[in-house]
Structures are given as structure tokens and as C-alpha cells.
Amino acid sequence: MNGSATDRHRFLRTRRSVRRFADRPVPDDVLRRVLDTARWAPSAHNRQPWRWVVLQSPAVRQALADAMGEAFRRDLEADGLPAAEIAARVARSRQRLLTAPVALLLAADLSVGDVYPDAKRQQAERLMLIQSAALAGLQMLLAAHAEGLGGVWTCGPLFVPDLVRQVLRLPASWEPQALFYLGYPAHSPAPPPRQPLDALVMWM
């Protein structure tokens, strides 16, 4: 692999959450390389539970944006937020889904896990599959970064998994986890603050 270890660490640390994209399409072969690299993420029992839905159809994006936007609006109204803030937040979330050059749904296929007779181990198995899918999400973002793309991970589907499953007609075992938006960055965000290493690590 070219470059020093320092160079490789620097590359990993330069990934940013990008929400504004240039008006430039992402070629299909680039997107396929990104997803092909994502499937090399580690997974519990090597079950590879990640499932991707590439939202290419404007009609599908519109249907999902409408359904999720209305659910988001109801939640914000229940929270008692001002009407103007609700409208702005819903419009912003809809706009991302409708206009991002690439929109991807990540789901975890819960059918590939082991089956246990007790609820405690079954819940652990479910969490392992979800964690494995999340690893593929990070791998995908790093692969996109390697292609010069920016991207952002959003967790809206976690709040309305059944709704997302219904709108996209997903298999019953696919549990929606996240929406990712990718494209060529319109700007480079400043590095976000990070907690010091010693505040996060216990040496025992």
C-alpha cells in the first residue's frame, strides 16, 4: 500500500460528514466500487447482514420523502416545537433525500442470524447483526472518501422502520438502519471537535 502509516492515518482522519454536494452526478462504476468495498466489512459469524437499497427513481425518493417527512412532522409537533422550526427541519430533511446525487438505504437482514430459545440471547444476536450492518456503513463511507466523494450518515429510518419497509416494499426481515447521502462535496467542512484520547480509553 502506497504511503506511510502516518499518511494512511491522515487520510482516515480527513473523512467528513458532507451535506452539500456539487451539481455533478456520481458515475455508476464509482458507486459500484464503493458498495463492493463496503461488503468487505467484518461481520459477526461472517453472516454479512448488510443490505443496500440504491434510491435511483425520483418517484421512489418522493414517496419516501413524503412519508418520512409527515412522520417527522408529527413527532416534532408532539415535542411542542414552534411551527416555523418544524417546517424548516422537515423541509431540510426532505430536500436532502430529493436532491442528493446518491441516496442509499442501509438495512440489516435479521433472517441470517442464529435462533435461540431465550429472549436474552436472541436480543444479543439481533444486536450483533445491527452492529455488523453499521460496520458496512462506515466501510462504505471510507470507500466513498477514497473516491473523492463526501457523504453523511442519517438515522431517520430508525424512527420509522415499518414505514420505510412499507414504502420501499422491503422483505419483512430487512430492518432499516440509516439513509446515506453521497456526492462530490460542494465544500469541505472544518474538522469537528474530538474528545481527548485519555478521556475515552481505560488501560487495565
Image: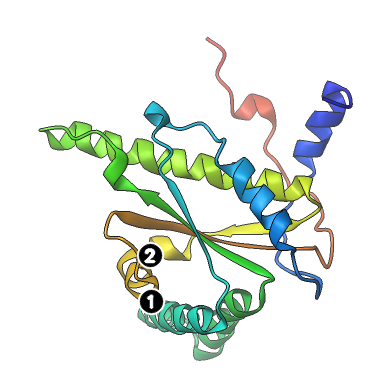
Is residue 11 visible in the rendered image? The answer is: yes
Rendered position, 32 above or below 85: above
Is residue 17 visible in the rendered image? The answer is: no
Residue occupying the far left of the picture: 117
Q: Position of residue 62 (x, y in %)?
A: 51, 84
Circle 2 sits in a helix, a strand or a loop, which is it?
loop
Q: Residues at badges 2 and 1 in contact (C-beta under 8 Å)?
A: yes
Who's the residue at 80% across and 72% down the image?
24
Q: Position of residue 29 (x, y in %)?
A: 71, 56
Residue picked out by circle 2 = 159
Q: Quadrant of residue 80?
A: bottom left
Q: Quadrant of the N terminus?
A: top right
Residue picked out by circle 1 = 75
Circle 1 sits in a helix, a strand or a loop, which is it?
helix
Q: Which amino acid type is marked by label 1? A: Asp
Who's the residue at 38% across and 76% down the image?
75
Residue occupying the far top of the picture: 204
Identify which residue, 194 or 46, lies in the foreground. 46
